[in-house]
Image (spheres, rainbow, N blue to C red):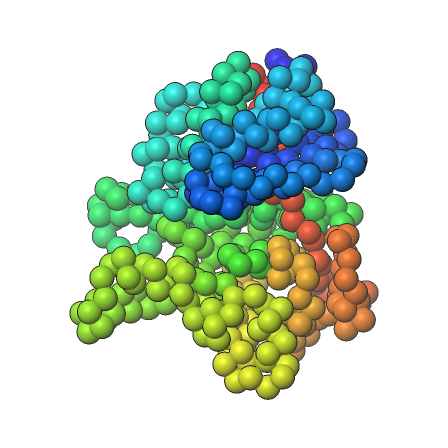
Amino acid sequence: MTTGTRVLVLNAGSSSVKYQLIDMLDGAKLASGLVERIGEEGGRLLHLPLTGEPRETLRRFDGHDVALEAVAEELAKDLMGLDSPELAAIGHRVVHGGLRFTRPTLVTDAVLGEIRRLIPVAPLHNPANITGIEVARRLRPDLPQVAVFDTAFHATLPEHAARYAIDRAVADEHRVRRYGFHGTSHQYVSRATARLLGRDPAELNVIVLHLGNGASASAVAGGVCVETSMGLTPLEGLVMGTRSGDADPGLVFHLHRVGGMSVDQIDDLLNRRSGLLGLCGDNDMREVVRRAQEGEEDAKLAFDSYVHRIRRYLGGYYAVLGRVDAVAFTAGVGENSAEVRAAVCANLEELGISVDPELNAVRSRDARTVSPSYSRVAVAVVPTDEELEIARQTFALVHEV
């Protein structure tokens, strides 16, 4: 058992590394930062210590190993380097864990091999996550490394919710099912909502709306996820910044046969040139709202489509849960767009859902309710903290072993 109380959380992307150093005694964030444009000219490291001024380094970082070594140097300047005896473990965000990984897992060679086997179902994310783990293991081979999976919280989906209605043998052979994503956020926010309301998570039914550039919804019954909007990949579900969300599967065949588009072109269209961007040329909700308020029809269409899809899921999850105690908005759009929250909850008083215009207009970084005191369903704004959730799960695991 480790005696340290700090956890370094790493989120390695294809050309970036986000990190936070958290003291688990009180959840304090001792340092955080971002390395971006790894492998490119114009690389940048922004380090944010708990005390003192932010530090910025502008140079080329040739690989994730160079980037993480630079992160270690910045932490060492604050006397919190990777060699610190206070460091208990390193927690890694891994996007796809499939059915094999349904809880935080201590990384071994065998585990890393299994994560590598899942690359075909997460080709944009798992390779970068693996790179971050490999580099961290080289830098601190003696330190516990823990993988925390975006899909794990959704592993409790009932089989009837997780299955696609296709030939079972084909589905099983190719591991085709609904896995869900943003799990650490949905798990954190569902519990934080219970704390906000002074309720036991085990007795609370919550619909969590994680609305950022990527967006997803979940239905959480007594702390257990029973439905979520993303599926085999993060493309399914809500309208997002650049992703289409739900679309007729026949669209792919139509674009290929009639439009002459290749599979890669269709993939690029649905993942990078659709959603808000595809509808109005802008994937920043603040700009979409501004343009819609100024009367631009394409921006209004994008906003209305975005809200309509959320309301479809909200109503569907209400039916799945049978009783809803709270609706929680989180992530960049959910936390900051009063316009989106108001539009999603409009005319839902018969379901016990409404927002107080004055409370909804308040900007705050604190968790809060924005529904009237008499509402049957609490509408909450709960800032997500995926890094803290990863740190908690990592710390709990290393103290089990």
Q: Position of residue 382 (x, y in %)?
A: 69, 53
**Location of residue 276 with respect to 394 vertically, above or below:** below
Q: Position of residue 32 (x, y in %)?
A: 66, 37
Quadrant of residue 385 within the rendered picture? top right
State left or right for residue 136 relative to residue 168.
right
**Can I make out residue 316 in this image?**
no
Tell me where residue 356 sits by quadrant: bottom right
| Residue 1 to residue 272: above or below | above
Q: Nearer the viewer, residue 164 or 18?
A: 18
Would residue 189 be found to the left or right of residue 170 on screen? Answer: right
Residue at (51%, 46%) from the top-left corner?
42
Left or right: 30 as drawn, with respect to 279: right
Q: x, y (%) of residue 252?
A: 27, 65
Give me the residue at 50% from left, 81% from top.
298
Q: What residue lies at 47% left-to-right and 72% top-to-bottom?
A: 281
Q: Position of residue 355 (x, y in %)?
A: 73, 70
Q: Residue at x 38, y 38 (%)?
A: 127
Residue 17 in view: yes
For the C terminus, the quadrant is top right
Total numbered circles: 0
